[in-house]
Amino acid sequence: MLVKGLSLLFLGIGVFVLMQVAMPFISFKTWEMFGYESEKNLLDPAPVSANGNLAPDFSIETVDNFPVILAKNKNLKPPYYEFKVSIPKIGLNSISTQVYSEHFDKNLAHLPGSALPGEKGNAFITGHSMLPNLSPKGSTAFFAKLPDVKKGDDIIIDALGQRYIYKVTELKIVDPSDISVIIPPDSNGRYISLMTCVPPGFNTKRLVVVAKLGI
């Protein structure tokens, strides 16, 4: 009787843990199929750089079995070292973002060579994601709830005492090797793009949230 009781207990625990993983995955896939609207051609799929050169300024490299976007120019010096990102819709408040950084284990990272906040071009920011139900207090998976962002939501950037309010214009799901997401949608606008892994807890795809300043 005791063995049967323990078996049922472990089975119940296993089912509970499985549901904690499966439900966010199923929820995300349902959103991707029915609630996700993407203008597939908003970002130029051609591998060109922000200044129009045919040779890209960025590359995809595998770091610790994880494909990441890296800047080819390793000698860029940041004009300043940090700005803050807030997204009221998902309760993200003044998260440190390191300028010209390819490391986002403890903060968000602003891709070297991409535009700075307020500049023309596309300020490209990367952050970790994980299963929302399993995110511990103090987790650095700041973009765990990024799929909850909608068109028209605010992304607020505080840099050098200046506040910039961007409005979300598009959400885009791409392959990890898609480097076109760095390119701004047009040559005159001031954009910001936030990228994280999806589905939450997995790294098979990337979600890119694109927002524009001054709309």
Image (cartoon, rainbow, N blue to C red):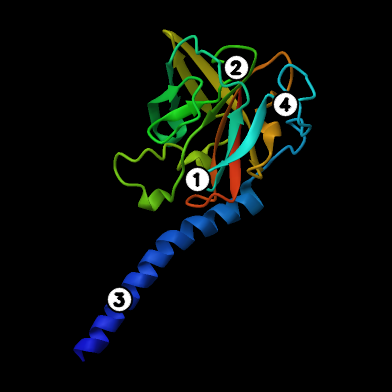
User: Which of label 4 and label 2 is nearer to you?
Assistant: 4
Asked whether the residues under the numbered discs 3 and 2 touch, taking CB atoms below 8 Å apart as contact, a structural biologist would say: no
Q: Which kind of residue does numbered mark 4 sit on?
A: Pro
The reply to whether callout 4 and callout 2 are in contact (CB within 8 Å) is no
The circle drawn on residue 56 is 4
* SS class, disc 2: loop
Position of residue 43 measured from the top left corner of the image (x, y, whole percent) = 73, 31
- Which amino acid type is shown beneath numbered disc 1? Asp
Whether 204 is drawn above or below 82: the answer is below
* Residue bearing the label numbered 3: 10
Q: CA distance from mark 4 to mark 3?
A: 52 Å
> Disc 1 versus disc 4: distance between alpha carbons?
23 Å
Q: Earlier in the sequence, mark 1 or mark 4?
A: 4
Residue sitting farthest toward the left: 2
Residue 45, horizontal then vertical, whole percent: 77, 34
Look at 59% across and 30% down and name the residue there.
70
- Residue at 80% of width from left, 24% of height from top? 54
Quadrant housing the N terminus? bottom left
Q: CA distance from mark 3 to mark 1?
A: 34 Å
- Residue 67 location, x and y as percent? 58, 43
CA distance for labels 4 and 2: 15 Å
Marks 1, 4: nearer the viewer: 1
